[in-house]
Image (cartoon, rainbow, N blue to C red):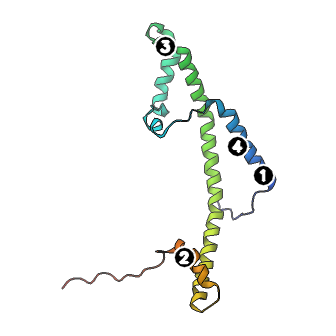
Amino acid sequence: MPISRNDTPLTAAQATAIQAGIESIKSAFATQQVGLTPDERTSLSNLGDTRYPFGQRTITTHAVNNPLLVPPFKPLGRAADSLTLYNQFNTYLPQLVQLVELMSEAQQMPGHNVYEFTRAVYDLAKQGSAAGVPGADTIVQDIGELFAGQGNFNTPPPTPAP
């Protein structure tokens, strides 16, 4: 796909529609938010693609056909609800991940443009500073930190020992 050079800002209507969509999703999802701690995020089991078929068969077939093997402290109905919710999220997550990827890519191009513009101004400010242009030193000092350590450092190869 060709790179779009369109860096026209969003219209007010577009920005409002995007924000309203985000707020709508957050509101619809509010009762399912659990607020895991960082430790819980890494310690809780994940179902994932590999384990999903086993969990699905256990809930929809094995537990239904063998109710004596269902622990009384882990009711089948609750497990079935968890599977349904998992499946619902599985419907939306790929779409949201794709949307985040599209938005990240859309942001990357104007970010690149801003960086390249900043680099061009900095390069000219360095030349201006060397030529004594008033104000150029201030620009070099202000944004020079961004470019510190970058550039072409043509270090000669080490001299071989005799």
Density class for disc 3 (Cα within 10 Å; few <14, some 14-19, many ≥20) is some
Numbered tag placed on residue 127 in the rendering = none
- Which mark sits nearer the N-terminus, 4 or 1? 1
- Which mark sits nearer the N-terminus, 2 or 1? 1
Count of numbered marks: 4
Q: Secondary structure at mark 3?
A: helix
Q: CA distance from mark 3 to mark 2?
A: 66 Å
- Residue on which disc 3 sits: 63
For residue 126, above or below residue 102? below
* Residue 155 in picture, x, y percent from top left: 37, 81
Q: Quadrant of residue 81?
A: top right
The amino acid type found where label 2 is placed reads Gly
**Closer to us: mark 3 or mark 1?**
1
* Camera-side residue of 28 and 108: 28
Residue drawn at point x = 61 percent, y = 79 percent = 139
- Which mark sits nearer the N-terminus, 3 or 4? 4
- Which mark sits nearer the N-terminus, 3 or 1? 1
Q: Quadrant of residue 124?
A: bottom right
- Residue on which disc 4 sits: 22
Residue 88 located left or right of residue 159: right
**Closer to us: mark 4 or mark 1?**
4
Numbered tag placed on residue 14 in the rendering = 1
The amino acid type found where label 1 is placed reads Gln
Q: Quadrant of residue 3?
A: bottom right
Q: Are marks 3 and 2 in contact (CB under 8 Å)?
A: no
- Which mark sits nearer the N-terminus, 2 or 4? 4
Residue 161 located left or right of residue 118: left
- Residue on which disc 2 sits: 144
* Residue 144 in picture, x, y percent from top left: 54, 76
- Which mark sits nearer the N-terminus, 3 or 2? 3
